[in-house]
Image: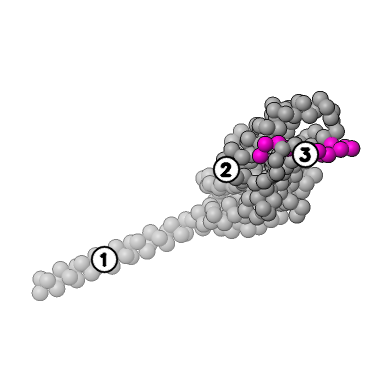
Amino acid sequence: MWQDIKMLNAISGALLGLAALALLASGVWWLAQRPMFTLKTIRIEAAGKSELRRVNPLIIRASALPRIKGNFFTANLDTVRTAFESVPWVRKAAVQREWPNTLIVTIEEHQPLATWDDDGRLLSVYGDLFTANLDEAEEDGELLRMSGPKGSEKDVTARLADFRSWFAPLKLSPVEVELSTRYAWTVKLNNGMTVELGREQNKSTLKDRVARLVQIYPQLLSRLQNRIESVDMRYPNGLALKASGMSSGLGSKKK
């Protein structure tokens, strides 16, 4: 009998506990639905110490804000983040709540580096492809032109930094970088000269070929002035060049 009483007491206690939890949950739900928690402000800030230059507030109002549902407690922050990352020029968005009715959205903008292929897409300084207005992208100057096989965007972006460093002794810099479907590299410099560097056979192939050009370029320039149109560095011990009015090859068969 005493065991039955103890069991009944345990069951009664459990039921009371569940009732208390249900009451508490109901109270929390009721409180969460109060008008004071209705979202009244969505504050947009730039990441770090930068300023937002290209993210358009009108587009945010038209495309991002209508996708935000719920109040301070119930709004899904991942959904909010995704909504803002769908806006042109937004690279990343981070969202946090601010008591009692505000969301803070921190935005990192894309930094344009180049046009990619001929399909209208842009390439950022981080090697990300994105779509945006070209005129806006070129407000600070004309972009580079870069291209390569699908999935090579970050490799081409990283290689650009090498080319800039390697050609710096000549006071020349790349304006176009192409990686062909055969993974051969071609660079056009800001003096109009195109340099064929070929495929990367080992870690030093490209660097060594540029170094040979850097060494001989002053002599070529003194003889041909600014008439050099292209230089082919795919020869193991020489080069071939094309200048306005002439072409020549020096060295063994190219690879």
Mark 3 and mark 2 in contact (Cβ < 8 Å)?
A: no
Residue at x-position 86% and y-position 38%: 246
Q: Distance between the residues labelled 1 and 3?
A: 92 Å
Q: Residue furthest right?
A: 245
Label 2 belongs to which residue? 202
* Residue 75 in sight here: no
Q: Does the magenta stretch include residue 162?
A: no
For marks 1 and 2, the one nearer the N-term is 1
Q: Residue furthest left?
A: 1
Residue at x-position 77% and y-position 52%: 118
Residue flagged by tag 1: what amino acid is it?
Ala
Mark 3 and mark 1 in contact (Cβ < 8 Å)?
A: no
- Is residue 37 positioned above or below 164 on the image? below
Q: Which residue lies furthest to the front in this view?
A: 252
* Residue 17 in sight here: yes
Q: Give coordinates of residue 195: x percent, y percent.
A: 74, 39
Of residue 155 and residue 170, the one placed in the foreground of this image is 170
- Is residue 90 positioned above or below 221 on the image? below
- Report the coloring of the rendering: one colour
Q: How crowded is mark 3: few (under 14 residues within 10 Å), some or many (20 or more)?
A: some
Label 1 belongs to which residue? 14
Residue flagged by tag 3: what amino acid is it?
Gly
Q: Give coordinates of residue 2: x percent, y percent.
A: 10, 71
Is residue 192 left or right of 2 when viewed as pictured? Answer: right
Q: Distance between the residues labelled 2 and 3?
A: 24 Å
Q: Give coordinates of residue 88: x percent, y percent.
A: 70, 50
Span of residues in magenta: 236-249
- For marks 1 and 2, give the one nearer the viewer: 2
Label 3 belongs to which residue? 249
